[in-house]
Amino acid sequence: MLTAKLPLLGKRHRMQVLVALTYHIMNFAHGLGIGWVSPTVQIIQSPETPLSFPVTVEQVSWIGSLFGFGFLSGNILFGLTANRLSRKLNMYLLALPNMLFWILNYFVQNVEYLYAGRFFAGVTSGGLFVIAPIFFSEILDKDVRGTLMSMGMMFLSCGVLIGFILPTKVDYYLTPCIGLALPIIYVVVFCFFPETPQSLLRSGRFTEAETAFNFYKGIDNGVNVQLSRRVEESKTATEVQSEFEFPFSDPCATSLLKKSTKAKMVRKQGLTIFSKRYRMQILVTLAAHIMTLSHGIGLGWLSPTLLILQSPRSPLEFKVAVEDVSWIGSIFGLGSLSSNIFFGLLAARIARKTNMYLLAIPHMLFWILNYFAQSVEYFYASRFFAGLTSGGLYVIGPVFISEISAKEIRGALTSLAMMFYSCGILIGFILPSYLDYHLIPCIVIFLSIIYFAVLSLFPDTPGSLLERGQLEEAEKAFNFYNNIDRKGTVRELCVNELQTSTAMSAFEELKASKLKGGKATSITLQDFFNKSALKKFAIAFVLCLQNQFSSSFAFVNYMSHIFAESGSTLNPQDCTIFVGVVQILCTLLASILVEKFGRKTLMLASTAGMALGMFGFGAFVQFTDDATKAEYNWVPLVAVAFVTATASFGVISLTFTIIVEILPAKIRAQAQSIAMMFCSIMVFITLKLYPYFLFNLGISITMYSCASSCVFTGVYLLIFLPETKGKSMAND
């Protein structure tokens, strides 16, 4: 049934969903205030300021930083009131500092009003992160808790986006009036919901606590829960009631009572990416993708920054010529090639986790060199280090994630890399428009530090430990990533016996494969030059050719230039940001579709879409005059967005997933390094030639050439590319 697959749609969760959406009004309102500040600060510093006093750069820095003081104060304040006041009263109090933020911005008389407003915005933020998770944990069922709580960031992001837009469309004094209405609506609607059961129990109000529990669980006290409803909602009435009767009971005991019912449900529904068995796999993947996000920021940052450095408003003391731009772009490929060799040699010699740590070093050097840039040679060196990071990510990252993830979700987890990469690129596109050149490296370098700290919390991959003969540690790591305890039973937060059996058989298969083809059997040249291996190398090389010669990566580096050269009168930086949003959405789409339609189908559809979009874009530029280009100035934006969208759900997001899946298991690490070395050479060639094609031969020839590459490689892949969906990583 639909409600079995989507628990949010079940009647039992209706009130939980409603109260979550009500709370997210506050998240949206807070996001609106955060987003509103950025463009508003620019407006009040300009000659068109609506305020009666000037705002200096120093004051802007205080406006920004006081948010942090407010956040800290909000953490302390709501930390003290969390157990002293009722949960619902604390939730009401969240609206107060948000309302004060808007009131102070409306009646502003001097910069101190803005300071106070940002402080109260920080208090709201601190409270949201303290009280809301506690409130939600006490009213939400575990099968919908993650979904409803994670929606908070979606509402916050929507608010930020609206905050970015409003100052450019409405009067300064109208936005606070709109923003003030939201917390008022939040308080009014929240009145209709009861206190949390746990909060009422602590106050000794047992009857009210049971009433509140029944309200949030969708239970009618006067009607017995029918069998059909129990099947639909995946729990029996006894189980639901036991949650109220023993709200602080041992979760292990509760797990044993529910084991039989859960086993039936898992057999019926199967495993999905949201299964609790995969929780640790998802967490470590997200931790690894912090580096992917940070690397994407560096790549996206380059495109608008190059335009700024070539303009009269350059923040640096030296000029950057077109020839310099060409080398800045192409030297990335040399760094990537060096990294492929470096990490290829290290892949089988040191632990996977150590290799993952090493990725942070060249990335930090990239930002340090950009901060202290004294000449164009600093940019050459920094881009080389960016290439080192990129090469390592594409050699070690897919191998690391494939070794910790189950085959049912491997495609989704590996393709997530491109979503984080795209998010980073979008952030990189935006930052140079709003922040000082020297501030950006100071912010982004902290992501590497966070990445290093978070990754240290997770063990090495089972495959890596088996290769080094650490069988006991390998089994512990496997159990950790599959949420299995040492006795072979599933943790109460994970799954049932069926999932345990499946997971343990996968480990035995992996162990047998590693003992047969790992250290016990040496790697020889014959492993690389047999017919099967050569065929797989050929497919990997064609995928690399397609990935680069289709211009999927060059688009990112020269997107602002593409819009500037297309004849469109739209702002190139605005167009670049829009395309960045499109790329994020479509890489997310790839993560959703990859396990449904398979790799090959998405890859071929992506290739065909790119070819069609680039042929159309080239034809528009070639066969229209200046008047037509001015009248239809939106066509280049639509064309580039279409090409980026189709590239994102296949060529960008799946290329490296497919490569790591098709390569022979025995030599996978070495073969992955060879494939990425070839890809790096293609990166260098593409980035070196692309400016020549773009500025000398024109957009039309550039688009036709890249589209033709898509056609030729697409035909090859149609014939020779196998489907790798569900393929075991332990066998060829």
Image (cartoon, rainbow, N blue to C red):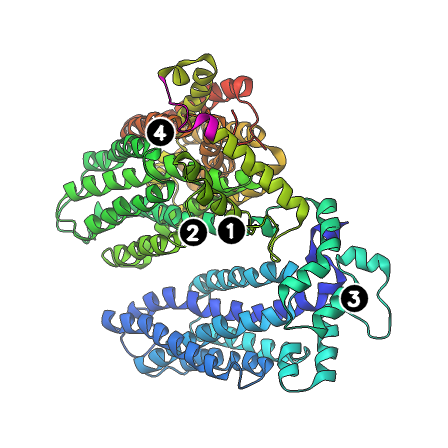
Instruction: Tell me if mark 2 has few (under 14), some (14-19) or many (20+) residues whose alpha carbon lies within 10 angstroms of its own.
Output: some
Return the disc, 3 or 2, that comes first in the chain's sequence. Answer: 3
- Label 1 close to label 2 by CB (< 8 Å): yes
Question: Is the Cβ of the residue at disc 2 closer than 8 Å to that at disc 4?
Answer: no
Q: Secondary structure at mark 3?
A: helix
Spatial CA span between label 1 and label 2? 9 Å
The stretch in magenta equals 515-524
Q: Nearer the viewer, residue 69 or 166?
A: 69
Q: Position of residue 612 (x, y in %)?
A: 51, 28
Residue 701 at what x, y percent from top left? 37, 24
131 up-or-down from 386: above or below: below
- Taking the spot 64% from the left edge, 45% from the top edge, the residue there is 499
Label 1 sits on residue: 280
Secondary structure beneath label 2: loop
In the image, 140: left or right of 614?
A: right
Residue at the spot of label 4? 673
**Residue, disc 3:** 238
The circle drawn on residue 458 is 2
Classify mark 1: helix, strand or loop.
helix
Q: Position of residue 425 (x, y in %)?
A: 38, 46
With 477 as the anchor, is 556 left or right in this view?
left
Q: Nearer the viewer, residue 481 or 26?
A: 481
Q: CA distance from mark 1 to mark 3?
A: 30 Å
Q: Is residue 426 above or below residue 729?
A: below
Residue displayed at 43% across by 22% down: 542
Camera-nearest label, 3 or 4: 3
Choose mark 2 or mark 4, whichever is in front: 2
Above or below, 358 against 686 in this view is: below
Measured Cα–Cα span from mark 3 to mark 4 = 56 Å
Q: Name the residue located 52 percent from the left edge and 45 percent from the top edge.
A: 588
